[in-house]
Image: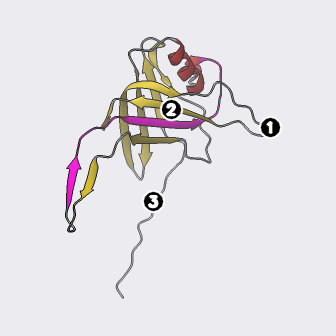
Amino acid sequence: MGDFATKHSVQAVGGVTITYLHTGIDAAAITIQGFKLQSQFLNAENAIDNSVIIPILGGGSIQLTNNNIAGTITFNCTRVSDKITDGDIVTIAQKQVSIGDSVGATIAITWPFNGATFSITFYNCTVKRVPAARLAGNDAPDYSVQFNYGYYKVG
């Protein structure tokens, strides 16, 4: 048996910054708020696979690839305000739907991890789905707000 060394990482939580910019909603970038500390609050996935395998009789295959990076961002959040400038993503998404958007927003995400800073920016973000209302008893209700994006850039 060889030596086994585990690398340990330290991560202070809550250091993520998410900004939203849409010139038809506000002239300045808005910092998004309303994410619960104890849960996954963001998921971004491409709309289609970037590689497809076509099995061929006899055991072979054809692999097709593409560079499409359009997809969907899902924010799991709760309401924190009824004001757009306070960064409530539910209110912001409802407003973007109401204006009959034909431009799309820019959503930028930056977060530190293990001494490095990561960033990704999503462009041409249009609202796919935003709940009208959610209520809960002894908790703040969860809202799943989805934006479709045209493309993204890392870094």
Q: How busy is the neighbourhood of tag 2: few (under 14 within 10 Å), some, or many (20 plus)?
A: many
Mark 3, residue position: 9
Tell me the CA gap for discs 1 and 3: 37 Å
Rendered-image quadrant of the C terminus = top left
Mark 1 and mark 3 residues within 8 Å of each other at the beta carbon:
no
Q: How busy is the neighbourhood of tag 3: few (under 14 within 10 Å), some, or many (20 plus)?
A: few
Tell me the CA gap for discs 3 and 2: 31 Å
Task: Give the amino acid at mark 3.
Answer: Ser
Question: Mark 3 falls on what kind of element?
Answer: loop
Mark with earlier residue (1, 2): 1
Asked whether, in this view, residue 2 is left or right of residue 41, the answer is left
Question: Mark 2 falls on what kind of element?
Answer: strand
| x then y, percent, for residue 42 | 50, 41
Q: Closer to the observer: label 1 or label 2?
A: 2
Task: Give the amino acid at mark 2.
Answer: Gln
Residue 153 occupies which quadrant of the picture?
top left
Question: Mark 1 falls on what kind of element?
Answer: loop
Mark 2, residue position: 146
| x then y, percent, for residue 34 | 60, 33
Mark 3 and mark 2 residues within 8 Å of each other at the beta carbon:
no
Residue positioned 74% across, 32% down in the render: 135
Q: What segment carries the magenta color?
A: 61-83
| x then y, percent, for residue 64 | 21, 49
- Is 75 a magenta residue? yes
Residue 120 occupies which quadrant of the picture?
top left
Q: Nearer the viewer, residue 77 or 50?
A: 50
Tell me the CA gap for discs 1 and 2: 24 Å
Mark 1, residue position: 137
Residue positioned 54% across, 13% down in the render: 98
Q: Closer to the observer: label 1 or label 3?
A: 1
Rendered-image quadrant of the N terminus = bottom left
